[in-house]
């Protein structure tokens, strides 16, 4: 018997608001541990929460970005459970009346476009951050001790719950990748996987191929990269399939992804909703979203990645290049470069090639550099009209990214402008011809091999600044 995987993803996204979800403490996890805290986010007796309006609007933006219905009446609830990183012993979240419901996200798969349903986008507060110290196995259970930093506690956190519509780990990876691009395009989160501001839980079960029912679901935690998500799901498919083939049952549980060991490990039995004893948060009134508020938020929605890809393909880019430049880090730069007069294909090549390579080497992103769309247009023009050679253009770009000025300014200051004026270059060509009579004679006899030698001599005489294409043309006449 063959088995088919049924996969759903729960994605948590920390919002980049200036303050936390229910208090005025700043959202800043880089400060000294336990310094951005107050009675509200520490859950001290008598402290009352106040909802962050901007966080609500950004949650609505995510909902619209995922084609959700924005619910006019939603309620915050208490989700009761005890973990050391939960200072109140409950989490303010949403349960039966979330803010956004019934959405979908289309993803590209090997079989074409697959529509993945989005069950809900609901608001909640993040927990503190646990650091598990000691132990060599990579297992949380084997740590010698744990440290808790409550700076993150209370940070606005959106949980995006998909329908179980994915069948392969590759589809799950495509889903979270597209979801991350949408979040970045909306500008509501930095979505840094390595910092935990976007993280995933995978729900997976196996069923006999060709059937419609669901198997026993296992939830996988601790996946902070798309690669880890895909590997964890692949491992779990293999593990569950072996159990079923051998006649054993799959146990409903929560498992931890051990990155070092490359396998999932049992953490605890899987909780049901009734285990959390949800009830409406008594310190917060229900949230009412009227049509005017919803229309105002919808009007602020930026261009989404799928829309940008379609528009960039209309400019002549192939689908792969369009997908690369539509990413959150490069899309605005590309659009600005084209608006400034850059050839779309040239701008795309610069952004997906040298710019991305430079930012990776320097562990940054394009938005954190001085590079503008006008710079890309200027660089493309200078190379196109022969003022910069290919190698010089790459060098100029590096200095522009480092903050030395525009391409024109850098090229002039570093004496990298190529000699592309025929009248200016003709004198050097005449000098080279006069100094190499034997080569000139061979050229006159039809030996074009010496043409490359003569171009090299022109480059040498010009200090490497001559346009080699123009030099070749002048030598051949």
Image (cartoon, helix red, strand yellow):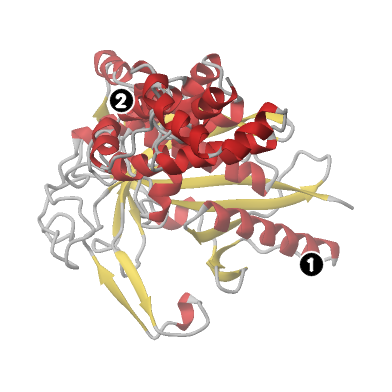
Specify the quadrant that holds the C terminus.
Answer: top right
Question: Where is residue 121 shown, x and y percent of the image?
Answer: 42, 36
Quarter holding residue 382: top left
Q: Which residue is mark 2?
A: 374
Q: Is residue 190 left or right of residue 8?
A: left
Q: Closer to the N terminus: mark 1 or mark 2?
A: 1
In percent of width and height, residue 38 lies at 11, 58
Q: Is residue 446 above or below residue 216?
A: above
Nearer to us of marks 1 and 2 is 2
Q: Secondary structure at mark 2?
A: helix
Residue shown at 40% from the left, 27% from the top = 427
- The location of residue 4, given as percent across then percent down, is 77, 47
Callout 2 environment at 10 Å: few (<14), some (14 to 19), or many (20+)? many
Q: Is residue 217 left or right of residue 384?
A: right
Residue displayed at 66% across by 45% down:
170
Q: Which residue is mark 1?
A: 248
Query: Where is residue 286 shown, x and y percent of the image?
Result: 25, 33
- Displayed quadrant of residue 405: top left
Q: Secondary structure at mark 1?
A: loop
């Amino acid at each position: 018997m063959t088995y088919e995987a049924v996969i759903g993803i729960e994605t948590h996204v920390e919002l980049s608001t200036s303050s936390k979800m229910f208090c005025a403490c700043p959202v800043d996890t880089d400060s000294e541990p336990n310094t951005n805290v107050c009675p509200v986010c520490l859950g001290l007796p008598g402290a009352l929460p106040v909802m962050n309006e901007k966080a609500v609007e950004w949650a609505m933006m995510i909902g619209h970005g995922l084609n959700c219905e924005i619910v006019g009446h939603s309620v915050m609830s208490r989700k009761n459970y005890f973990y050391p990183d939960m200072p109140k012993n409950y989490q303010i979240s949403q349960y039966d009346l979330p803010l956004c419901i019934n959405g979908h996200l289309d993803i590209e798969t090997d079989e074409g476009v697959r529509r993945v349903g989005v069950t809900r986008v609901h608001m909640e507060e993040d927990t503190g951050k646990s650091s598990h110290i000691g132990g060599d196995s990579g297992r949380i259970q084997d740590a010698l001790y744990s440290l808790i930093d409550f700076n993150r506690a209370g940070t606005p956190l959106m949980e995006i719950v998909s329908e179980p519509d994915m069948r392969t780990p590759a589809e799950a990876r495509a889903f979270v990748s597209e979801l991350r691009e949408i979040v970045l395009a909306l500008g509501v989160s930095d979505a840094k996987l390595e910092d935990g501001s976007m993280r995933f839980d995978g729900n997976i079960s196996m069923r006999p191929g060709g059937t419609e029912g669901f198997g026993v679901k296992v939830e996988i935690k601790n996946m902070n990269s798309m690669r880890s998500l895909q590997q964890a799901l692949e491992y779990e498919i293999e593990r569950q399939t072996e159990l079923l083939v051998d006649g054993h049952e799959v146990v409903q549980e929560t498992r931890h992804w051990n990155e070092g060991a490359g396998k999932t490990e049992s953490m605890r039995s899987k909780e049901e909703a009734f285990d959390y004893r949800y009830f409406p948060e008594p310190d917060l009134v229900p949230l009412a979203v009227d049509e005017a508020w919803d229309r105002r938020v919808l009007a602020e929605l930026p261009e989404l990645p799928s829309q940008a890809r379609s528009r960039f393909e209309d400019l002549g880019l192939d689908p792969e290049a369009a997908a690369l430049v539509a990413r959150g880090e490069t899309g605005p730069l590309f659009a600005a470069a084209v608006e400034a007069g850059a050839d779309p294909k040239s701008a795309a090549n610069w952004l997906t090639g040298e710019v991305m390579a430079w930012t990776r080497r320097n562990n940054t992103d394009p938005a954190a550099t001085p590079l503008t769309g006008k710079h890309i247009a200027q660089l493309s023009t200078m190379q196109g009209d022969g003022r910069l050679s290919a190698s010089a253009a790459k060098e100029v770009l590096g200095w522009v990214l480092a903050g030395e000025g525009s391409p024109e300014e850098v090229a002039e200051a570093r004496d990298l402008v190529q000699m592309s004026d025929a009248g200016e270059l003709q004198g050097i060509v005449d000098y080279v011809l006069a100094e190499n009579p034997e080569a000139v004679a061979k050229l006159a006899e039809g030996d074009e091999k010496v043409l490359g030698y003569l171009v090299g001599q022109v480059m040498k005489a010009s200090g490497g600044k001559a346009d080699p294409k123009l030099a070749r043309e002048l030598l051949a006449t």
